[in-house]
Image (tube, rainbow, N blue to C red):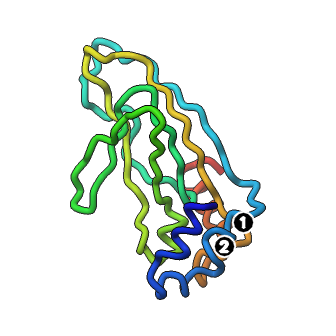
Amino acid sequence: IELLGWIDRESPATVQDGFSEPAAQMVTGSEQNLLRVLHYPPIGEDVAPGEERAAAHEDINLITLLVTGSEPGLQAMDTHGNWHDVPCHPGMITINAGDMLAKASQNYYPSTSHRVVNPPASENRSRYSMPLFVHPRPEVRLDAQQTAGEYLDQRLREIGLK
């Protein structure tokens, strides 16, 4: 909630005025948050280092908090379409803006495109990742057309999960 409070305080007035309620309040009482534990096993000898291990995507939710993975491999795309390795330092937390924050902020905070790539052969070990997907309450309006619940249902149908 502290991070969302920062978004409330530091966003331009036009962005703040576009929120249906302060960002920090959007998540208060939400039962939609999801903590996942992901395991990427060591790759086989027939798989090339640097190839995509988890395809490029954006997260549906408001923000994602990602404790540093056990091994490198996470990459994020900049606004020019270039991929950059995300540092893998113990204790570091990566924060990704999700599609719901992009929608609620009229894309002032664009969704973070990210992917996971295969490690070099010399670092071929299991990789673990624990993202916390922070969602607003379903009734929160993201814009004049959709609530967070409606948007989540739409996106889950699009990707075949509903």
Q: Circle 2 sits on which residue?
A: 147
Give the residue drawn at x 40%, y 56%: 112
50 sits left or right of 140 in the view: left
* Left or right of residue 17: residue 55: left
Q: Quadrant of residue 55?
A: top left
C-alpha gap between disc 2 and disc 1:
6 Å
**Residue 71 image-quadrant placement:** top left
Give the labeled residue for mark 1.
138
Answer with mark 2 or mark 1, whichever residue precedes in sequence: 1
Assess whether mark 1 and mark 2 are in contact (beta carbons under 8 angstroms). Answer: yes
Tag of residue 40: none
Helix, strand or loop at mark 2: loop
Is 16 positioned to the left or the right of 127 in the image?
right
For image coordinates 72% across by 65% down, the residue present is 138
**Residue 136 placement (x, y as % from top left):** 66, 63
Q: Position of residue 91 (x, y in %)?
A: 48, 36
**Looking at numbered disc 1 in the image, what kind of residue is underneath it?**
Pro
